[in-house]
């Protein structure tokens, strides 16, 4: 299942650290279809992703092991978040949770508000800045059940909307980016990006993500 996204934030449950990303990035293969397998707890999580290495794992390192499965499939019967975690392998990821071009984070989080200046560092568009244009939004998001597989739609409520004119803030491949306040030092997490269009990006409120996982942000 050749999917990739940014190796972004870390979360912790007790003393154990995890990569935090989207369910559809870390555990998106949810049917036993064309490739004869589905995502399983313990699956290797590699960096760089297969898309960056012409789908050859020889060019990647195993950095974590999948620790949670899909929150988005089947439609309508799963939590109101698109998130998953993978337990970090010792020595493979910086333990301070720093994100490329963002740096270390605050251990505290921040609720979204309209007009809040935000930024994210993503696999496709890199470091970008924008503002929150809406909160408490209801959205329908289209997914595939495996690479080149069947389609399904998941509905969400209470979501964060971010201005994304011309897909300059977020584009395909940026899923799993952490949305943070636009400050220079130890920004607080606001949301987890997971979907969008050429005008709007969408993020789960970070509080909902962490509550579902029983986790906290790795930060200062």
Image (tube, helix red, strand yellow):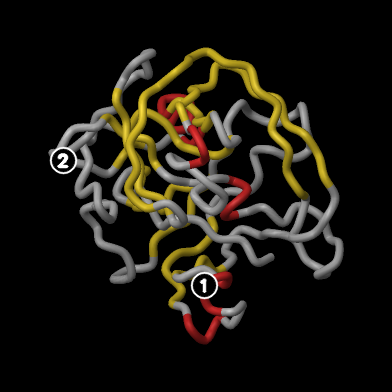
Callout 1: helix, strand or loop?
A: helix
**Residue at (45, 69) in percent of width and height:** 47
**Residue at (41, 25) in percent of width and height:** 207
Q: Quadrant of the C terminus?
A: top left
Point out residue 58 in the picture as x, y percentages from the top left corner: 52, 86
Name the outermost residue toward the front: 166
Front of the two marks 2 and 1: 1
**Residue at (54, 45) in percent of width and height:** 22
Q: What is the CA distance from the residue labelled 2 to the residue labelled 1?
A: 31 Å
Callout 2: helix, strand or loop?
A: loop
Q: Which residue is mark 2?
A: 220
Height in image: 17 above or below 45?
above
Marked residue nearer the N-terminal end (2 or 1): 1
Give 111 or 217, whichever is nearer the viewer.
111
Point out residue 88 in the picture as x, y percentages from the top left corner: 39, 61
Horizontal side of 116 relative to 142 (left or right) equals left
């Amino acid at each position: 299942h050749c999917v990739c996204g940014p190796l972004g934030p870390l979360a912790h449950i007790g003393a154990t650290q995890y990569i935090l990303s989207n369910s559809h990035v870390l555990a998106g293969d949810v049917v036993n279809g064309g490739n004869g397998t589905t995502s399983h707890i313990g699956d290797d999580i590699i960096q760089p992703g297969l898309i960056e290495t012409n789908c050859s794992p020889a060019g990647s390192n195993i950095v974590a092991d999948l620790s949670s499965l899909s929150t988005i499939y089947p439609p309508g019967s799963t939590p109101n978040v698109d998130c998953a975690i993978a337990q970090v392998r010792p020595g493979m990821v910086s333990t301070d949770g720093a994100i490329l071009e963002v740096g270390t984070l605050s251990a505290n989080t921040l609720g979204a508000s309209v007009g809040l200046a935000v930024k994210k560092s993503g696999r496709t568009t890199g470091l970008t800045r924008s503002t929150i244009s809406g909160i408490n939004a209801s959205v329908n998001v289209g997914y595939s059940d495996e690479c080149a597989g069947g389609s399904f739609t998941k509905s969400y409520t209470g979501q964060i909307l971010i201005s994304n004119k011309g897909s300059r803030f977020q584009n395909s491949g940026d899923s799993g980016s952490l949305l943070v306040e636009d400050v220079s030092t130890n920004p607080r997490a606001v949301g987890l990006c997971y979907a969008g269009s050429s005008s709007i990006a969408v993020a789960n409120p970070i509080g909902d993500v962490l509550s579902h996982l029983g986790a906290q942000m790795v930060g200062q």
